[in-house]
Structures are given as structure tokens and as C-alpha cells.
Image (cartoon, grey):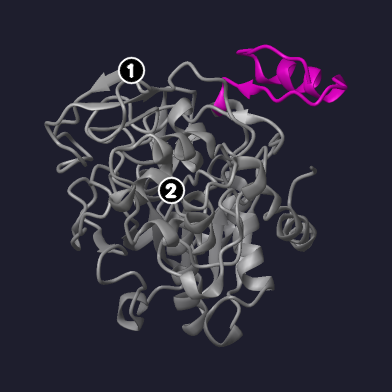
Amino acid sequence: MILKRFKNTVYFILLACISCSAQQAEINTYSSLGVGANRTESYLKFLEDKNVGVVGNQTSVIFKSETDYVHLVDSLLNRNIIIKKVFAPEHGFRGTADAGEIIKDGIDTKTGIPIISLYGSQKKPDPEHLEGIDIMVFDIQDVGARFYTYISTLHYIMEACAEQNIPLLILDRPNPNGHYIDGPVLEDEFKSFVGMHPVPVVHGLTIAEYAKMINGEKWLKNGIQCRLEIVDMRGYAPQLTYDLPIKPSPNLPNSKSINLYPSLCFFEGTNVNAGRGTSMQFQVFGSPFLDPLVFDFEYTPKSSDGAKYPKHENTLCFGRNLQNHNDLDYLNLEWLLQAYHHTQDQASFFNNFFSKLAGNASLQEQIQQGKTAQEIRENWESELNTYKKKIKPYLLYER
């Protein structure tokens, strides 16, 4: 698909439909996309005269334009919808907390609605949290990577709702990394909050499609299923990529970081910094232990919002600046391999988190054995083909 950026989404999609090449493109005007939250006529009927719980964060908005939007909670309150509680994922309801930071329960200062944290020790709502709630709404912008924890929160919300016989309304949003599927499929023994399901690192699904798969594959406890009501999008095309107008989390500040995130997040399981503590999060990587003759980009991580204690804080790091790198449509292993083979201390390169991110023990072993990226990728091919067939019943959009 040989396309340039267009501000007018209508013209863009018309051109995309008649193009015959496979090159991906971007939609600049995200607000013109018919995201689930904007399709109020399709879901208000489920919420009227009901006690509602909302699972949301700073991305849970209804767009008036690309730069003008209203939070879903505020919009629903203005329509006299009764919201009893808000449930907040990692980074909190307003999306400002550091990765891994404990989020406490509280009260939303703007609306006075109680906020229940779903990150830290309490990842799943207790039955008492759901008392008096007739229906739950899930509206969070995901980025399409297995280790991005919003899909783990989705799992626990679905499980809690199924146990209490509460329907879950999902307002769908685009997957900015939905244009490809790649990476090893998670093995059961490596399940954690950064990987709960046997899917590849880049799974290719929207949040609503993912919910359908959780139900269909009976991944919830005891094989129970959640009653889903889905409001899909209008004009969404998975083969395209999307510029998100709101940061999905503090350390994914722009489209470049979101595109590079699935590849660079592996560094979180090593002694290499992936840009936390800079303004270039998930667009650079570096370490004091990397060879400065090979890695000539220098930076020093500093404590900052969303990264209070970054790896190698206040220490000069040598690495790569990828801000001008072409957008990826595959999982890049070359940077990880280069860093491992040019570090001063290979013995301390990996930490225990790496296998959780990879979803297996074999990726670390293959890197340590000197396998090339192509040799490693060949091990994924069969399971990726199986996965692509498995997801077909759950797809909402033509691929």
C-alpha cells in the first residue's frame, strides 16, 4: 500500500481500499476513527438506569476532535449515568504512576467517585468491590504487546464479572501494533502478570478481540465465561498503524516509542536501560557496560515522572538512538543480540525478569548459545502459524 500521511481520514481510507501494495501506512487523524467510546448511541442503552462500574484511565475518552475530548466518566455523568466506582489499572486512573509502582485506592478529586486500584497486591476486584454494580465498562487503550499489563487487567475483570454474573461492556480501540503478529508464544510455566496467556509477544488483536479470545479459549478460572457486550469501531483497518493522541502510559510518549516497545521491552529483563529516565523512553537503549566503540550514543538517565528510579540513574550509558529508525512490522532481535555480544559482563546481562517477558527459557539460552536472529525466529514459525489460525473466530475486523 503505497501511501503518504493524510490529515483527512476519509480520503486516506478510500485510497487504502484501492491500493494494491502491502506497504503499511499511518492515520494522522485518530479522532476521525469511530472508536467504541464515540459510538454512544450503541451503548447508552446498556447503561441507563443501571449502577455502573468503569475500568478506565487517561485514555478513556470520547473525541470531539483530535485535540479536544472529554473523559468517558465525565461524559456518562453528564448523561445522568450512575457510576458507582472506577477501577484503575497499572499507572493509575490518571495514568501518571511509574511502571510497577503500587497504586492505592482513593477518590477521584474531580467527580468524587471511589477509585479501586487493580495494580499491586489487588489485581482482581473482590466480590465486595462489585456489590451493587449492574454492569461494568472496560475502555482502555492497549498497545498490542503481551507484556503490556492492561490485557492482564482485562483477564481479571472478566473473571470477577463472570463469577458475579455481571455483564462487561467493552468499548473497542485500535491496536497501534495490530499490523503484524510476531514473537514466541508464552509457555504455561512462565505465566505472570506480564504474560498470562499462550499468545505471541505481538498478538495482533484489539482489546475486544482479545476479550473474545479469553472467553473462547476458556482461559478464565475453571473455564468460566464472561457475558460480553462489545461496541466495535468504525473504519478500523488492522493493517494500518495509528498515531495515538493520548499517551497510553507515562513511558510510551509517542508513536515511535509504541512501535519500538515490543522489541525494546526485552531490555527490561537485562542490565540495559531502555530510555526510562529520559525523554526518549523506548526509543533509545544503553548501559555503562556496553562497548562505547560499538555504541556511540551517550545519555544519562535521571529520575523523572513515570521513572522515579530508572536503571543506571545518574550514570553515563552507551547505546543506540532509534528515534529515526524506520517503523517496524516485525519483532527486532538484532539490538538485543548486539548488546549481549558487546557488553563487558555477559554473566550479569540477564536478570530473572527476562524469561517472563520472553514467555520461555529458550530465548535467553539461544542468545547465550550464539544463535542468530534468523535462527531464533525459525523456532517461532510453526507456533505463529497455529496462533494465526486460532484467532480467526475472534476477529471483528477484516484482515
Left or right of residue 44: residue 121: left
For mark 2, give the secondary structure.
loop
Q: Quadrant of the C terminus?
A: top right
Percent coordinates x, y for residue 339 in the rendering:
40, 36
Percent coordinates x, y for residue 44 in the rendering:
55, 54
Amino acid carrying label 2: it is Arg
Q: Which residue is mark 1?
A: 296
Q: Quadrant of the N terminus?
A: top right
Residue under the point 76% across and 63% down:
390
Q: Is residue 68 above or below residue 336?
A: above
- Nearer-the-camera pick, 375 or 250: 375
Left or right of residue 304: residue 12: right
Q: Any magenta on residue 305? A: no
Percent coordinates x, y for residue 305 in the rendering:
18, 36
For mark 1, give the secondary structure.
loop
> In the rendered image, is residue 107 in sight?
yes
Q: Is residue 8 above or below residue 99?
A: above
Q: Which residue is mark 2?
A: 79
Left or right of residue 145: residue 41: right
Query: What residue range appears in magenta?
Result: 1-30
Residue under the point 38% across and 22% down:
294
Amino acid carrying label 1: it is Asp
Q: Residues within 10 Å of mark 1 (few under 14, many from 20)?
A: some
Q: Is residue 353 above or below residue 97?
A: below
Percent coordinates x, y for residue 52 in the rendering:
42, 64
- Nearer-the-camera pick, 370 or 182: 370
